[in-house]
Image (cartoon, coloured by chain):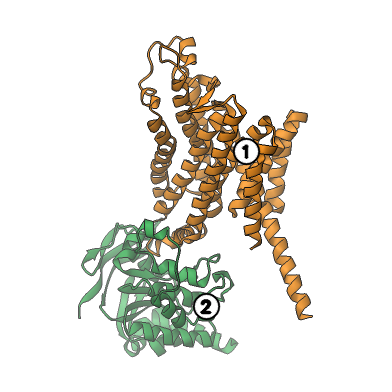
Chain colours: A green, B orange
Amino acid sequence: MTVLLDVRGLRVVFSGFVALDGLDLTVEEGELRFLIGPNGAGKTTLIDVVTGLTRPVAGSVRFGGTELVGRREHRIVRLGVGRTFQTATVFEELTVLENLDLAASFRLSLPSLLRKRRGVSDEVASALETAELTALADRPAGVLSHGQRQWLEIGMLLVQRPRLLLLDEPVAGMSKDERERTGELLQRIAATHTVVVVEHDMEFLRRYARKVTVMHQGRVLREGSVAEVQDDPEVREVYLGRSAVRGAAAEEVS
Amino acid sequence: MSSRIALALCVLLLAVAPFTLSPFRLGLLAKYLCFAIVAVGIALAWGQGGMLVLGQGVFFGLGGYAMGMYLKLSEAGSAGLPDFMVWSGVEELPALWKPFANPVFALAAVVLVPGLVAFLLGLLVFRQRVRGAYFAILSQALAAAFVILLVGRQGITGGTNGLTNFSRFFQLDLTDPNGQRAVYAIAAVVLGLVYLVARLVIRGRFGRLLVAVRDGEDRVRFLGYDPAVVKTVTFTMSAVMAGLAGALFVPIVGIISPALLGIVPSLELLVGVAVGGRFVLAGAIGGAILVNYAKTAFSEDFAEGWLYLQGGLFVLVLVFAPKGLAGLVTGARERLAARVRKERVA
């Protein structure tokens, strides 16, 4: 297996608060990796650094051998790293189709961008189908539900054909049914892509995760299969213990 | 369909105007058309791209001065010096002026100088992610600085008087009604062309991208686009349009001076677009013509009141019709369509 993402000694400090504290992480080509950890563990910060949104004070992020630290966001996307956000952000005034088309057109030159869109490319059509949004293609994205927005965002990611997908809490705030459909979508995507998922939802994790990385206070605490991680006493203490209580409470409420 | 009829009607009105309006009124209409050309650029930059351009007077002025310099030189006396230079004791033509004796150079400068200034400024500013109110203030400060520069270098620019006293525009005699009609026709055609270009830009993928940049600049970066490039290109287009308008303004009104380019005139350009509706090109054009017509009409009777009226109008529009008159029209049309649909169901 070849290493696709290689993070070494990453350190990020926000006005005194150490968000990442010498983090090391390796993701291999074709992997589906789940990143978990309590709030403030640095999961989203890690994604922010990889995608150029946050600059580290030290460390390196190599993607297929290329250093990403110091590159601007759109350059990193052009190298093949795509991401979604915790709160899905789509362009509400554009239609669903236009959102996807715009995402798919990012390699076009300026003169060809000035031209009008003609028809729908196969890629965009299949992304519409994957995201189950074909019926809503010509509606403004502003009318979409929370779950549909997440799927649209994932669809926008897929048409860009990234080599690495970073999904930040894709099922947060979703209904049970939506979660299940997202899980299926995730499995389909992971069959052909390298995917890193940040997720809080333990049930979702148990169902769909293969390899899990547990983060705590800006470092990697443990790495392994779901079962291995779940049985680890240290992990239970910092994360699963508290989360299991919270999860049980949430289930009782629902 | 109804918008096509409206468009045809506007073209018809503009076409019959030279034969029905007095030369004085036609001159005024031609002036409004110049402002409408600027308005198209503002609608592109502000309405579509979210860049609040408060200093379009700068680009209007660059185009205007480029044209004015050529016209002055083409009418210069035996010494080859424009009249105001003779009066202020300048003995040799300044180096800056020399190339403007060539009409091709001057015409190219009308487009290229505003375009280049906007392009360089845009790259500098948008790359540093200066946006929103900061960009607006910066563009306004630029207008103020430009006026100070023009007034300060009187020997080269004609100072506060600007460039004036033009009697010819290439082969056209500007004192003759036929010459004035021809200049009006040129302004109308340029407006039409600028409108078509802006419409193509808006309807293409680039237009969608521009709206995306307006609504979520940071998100656009993560689609692999550089918003700075998108904004710079659009800002440059709007500046070129303002430059063209300034160049046409010179033969139509017969003067270009700092008083026409500062903060207040730049804001007035914006008010027309806001009133008409910045999200719709036709709204911006109509608003620019309407507000400037109102300015003339009111100024004839009570000049002092106009500024207050204009300010009040601007506030009213921002509060009650943020999408301008065009927004009111589309809103009414949608309500009507909804009612028709409801009646059909019932």
Q: Position of residue B320 (x, y in %)?
A: 72, 53
User: Is any part of residue B307 visible from this angle?
Assistant: no
The disc labelled 1 sits on which kind of residue? Tyr
Q: Residue at x 62, y 58 (%)?
A: B4
The disc labelled 2 sits on which kind of residue? Gln
> Where does label 2 land, which residue?
A148
Separation (CA) of disc 1 from disc 2: 47 Å
Nearer to the camera, A63 or B296: B296
Horizontal side of B298 relative to B275 (left or right) equals right
Q: Disc 1 vs disc 2: Cβ atoms closer than 8 Å?
A: no
Nearer to the camera, B26 or B145: B26
Secondary structure, mark 2, is helix
Q: Chain of mark 2?
A: A
Secondary structure, mark 1, is helix
Q: Quadrant of the N terminus of chain B?
A: bottom right
Q: Does mark 2 fall on the same chain as mark 1? A: no
Q: Chain of mark 1?
A: B
User: Is any part of residue B104 visible from this angle?
Assistant: yes
> Where does label 1 land, which residue?
B32
Q: Position of residue B50 (x, y in %)?
A: 53, 52
